[in-house]
């Protein structure tokens, strides 16, 4: 009986935590971080304000738990485990494709993530710090994959890994911001699909050959201009 009761307690705790975090996310989408008060969360979720305090301790603790949930759910649901034959370029493409799928399958969760992200521009220093680290980690991950791809031959070696990682993260944030402010008028899924094509074309070793040829043609053209002059 004791085991059964502990199991029920665990389930009730998980259910209440889920309800509190769902309410917090809804409030962020509706009115920003300032609307996410413990009183409002308690009222929206059907639980007491004191439970929010006991469960998360502070607004920082609540936001951190919300971020952990959003990122964990995104990773679990969308990013497939790479098979043994997958290249680093395959992994980059799969990650971007996963983000595109999440827009269709769990648009609310992605919108909450981006809403919190852009709240980091305001007065909440803990958000600036948290998302500063989040972006740094993302750039580091993409840069690591670019370098791995260059080492194995799937990614062009004439590219700077840090620059490409910064480009990818900047593109994701630009698309996310437009979607956040205009969810009905901006087709984020289509934009992500186009962005994925651009990224793969930039990184692919086949595209690198095209860049090399173009550079040679431009050099020849420049030399012809000089000779004519």
Image (tube, grey):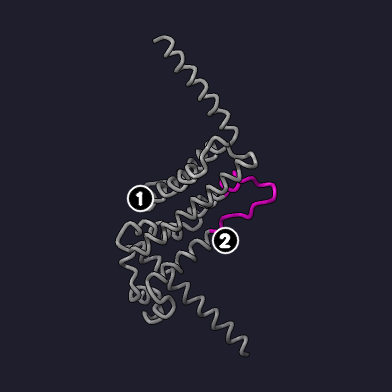
Q: Which residue is mark 1?
A: 182
Instruction: Say which label, 1 or 2, has the lower sequence index.
Output: 2
**Quadrant of the rendering where the N terminus is positioned:** bottom right
Front position among marks 1 and 2: 2
Q: Who's the residue at 45% across and 57% down the image? A: 134
Neighbor class of circle 1 (other Cα within 10 Å; few <14, some 14-19, many 20+) is few
> Where residue 196 sits in the image (x, y, percent)?
51, 42
Query: In the image, is 82 to the left or to the right of 141?
Result: right
Disc 2 marks which residue? 76
Q: Is residue 90 magenta?
A: yes
Q: Percent x, y for residue 153?
A: 64, 39
185 within the magenta span: no
Say which element carries label 1. loop
Asked if residue 77 is positioned above or below residue 214 in the image, the reply reads below
Q: Residue furthest bottom?
A: 1
Q: Could you tell me which secondary element the residue under label 2 belongs to?
A: helix
Against 153, residue 38 (above or below) is below
Which residue is rendered at x = 33% and y = 72% of the image?
37
Q: Which residues are magenta?
A: 75-94
Disc sitting over residue 222 in the figure: none
Residue 218: image x %, image y %? Answer: 48, 21
């Amino acid at each position: 009986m004791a085991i059964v009761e502990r199991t029920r307690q665990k389930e009730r705790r998980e259910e209440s935590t889920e309800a509190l975090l769902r309410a917090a996310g809804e409030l962020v989408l509706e009115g920003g971080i300032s609307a996410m008060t413990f009183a409002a969360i308690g009222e929206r979720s059907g639980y007491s304000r004191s439970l929010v305090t006991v469960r998360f301790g502070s607004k920082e603790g609540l936001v951190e738990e919300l971020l952990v949930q959003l990122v964990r759910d995104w990773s679990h649901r969308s990013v497939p485990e790479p098979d043994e034959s997958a290249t680093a370029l395959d992994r980059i493409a799969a990650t971007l494709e996963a983000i595109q799928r999440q827009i269709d399958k769990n648009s609310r969760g992605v919108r909450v993530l981006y809403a919190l992200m852009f709240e980091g521009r305001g007065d909440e220093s803990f958000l600036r710090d948290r998302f500063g680290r989040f972006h740094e980690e993302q750039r580091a991950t993409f840069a690591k994959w670019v370098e791995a791809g260059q080492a194995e031959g799937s990614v062009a070696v004439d590219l700077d890994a840090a620059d490409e990682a910064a480009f990818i993260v900047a593109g994701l944030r630009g698309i996310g911001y437009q979607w956040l402010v205009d969810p009905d008028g901006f087709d984020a899924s289509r934009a992500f699909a186009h962005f994925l094509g651009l990224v793969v074309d930039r990184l692919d070793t086949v595209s690198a050959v095209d860049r090399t040829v173009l550079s040679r043609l431009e050099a020849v053209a420049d030399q012809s201009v000089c000779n004519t002059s």
